[in-house]
Image (cartoon, rainbow, N blue to C red):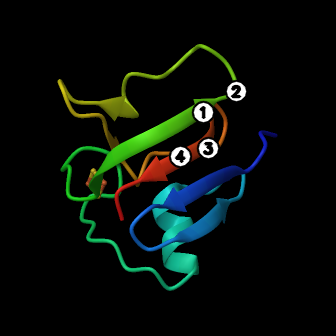
Amino acid sequence: MSDPMNLELRRTGVTVRVPPESTALEALEDHGIAVDSMCRTGICGTCETTVLGAEFASAAIPASILSGPGRCTVRLCIAEPGPLTRLIIDL
Ligand code: FES
């Protein structure tokens, strides 16, 4: 089992702990923070959010989680603890 991830919402000033087996989107919803979503499988891009910073448990960064030329983004519906230990987003 992986460690939880700290999800920091920079504009809101809130930090949400994302437990193992949960996604960032699910953890935000569990804390009453609404984020637009549709597919919830990482395909549509509705939940895509700008990343301001990230820390990883290892150097192996899955390209499917963080992407975007010139602007790093994350699809919150597929961002899970594991490789990510800390994520700072523009929310
Ligand atoms: S809800 Fe579709 S990519 Fe996240």
Q: Residue at x 52, y 37 (%)?
A: 54
User: Dot 1: what SS?
Assistant: strand
Which sits earlier in the primary sequence, circle 3 or circle 2? 2
Q: Does the residue at mark 3 contact the one at mark 2 (Cβ under 8 Å)?
A: no
Whole-angstrom CA distance, mark 2 to mark 1, is 7 Å
Residue indicated by mark 2: 57
Q: Which residue is drawn at 24% across and 44% down?
A: 43
Which sits earlier in the primary sequence, circle 2 or circle 4? 2
Q: Residue 81's x, y, as percent?
A: 64, 43
Q: Does the residue at mark 3 contact the one at mark 1 (Cβ under 8 Å)?
A: yes
Instruction: Give the left or right position of residue 60, taking residue 17 as reference.
Output: left
> The N terminus appears in which quarter of the rendering?
top right
User: Mark on residue 64?
Assistant: none
Residue indicated by mark 4: 87
User: Dot 3: what SS?
Assistant: strand
Instruction: Give the left or right position of residue 50, taking residue 86 as reference.
Output: left
Residue indicated by mark 1: 55
User: Mark on residue 86?
Assistant: 3
Q: Nearer the viewer, residue 27 or 73?
A: 73
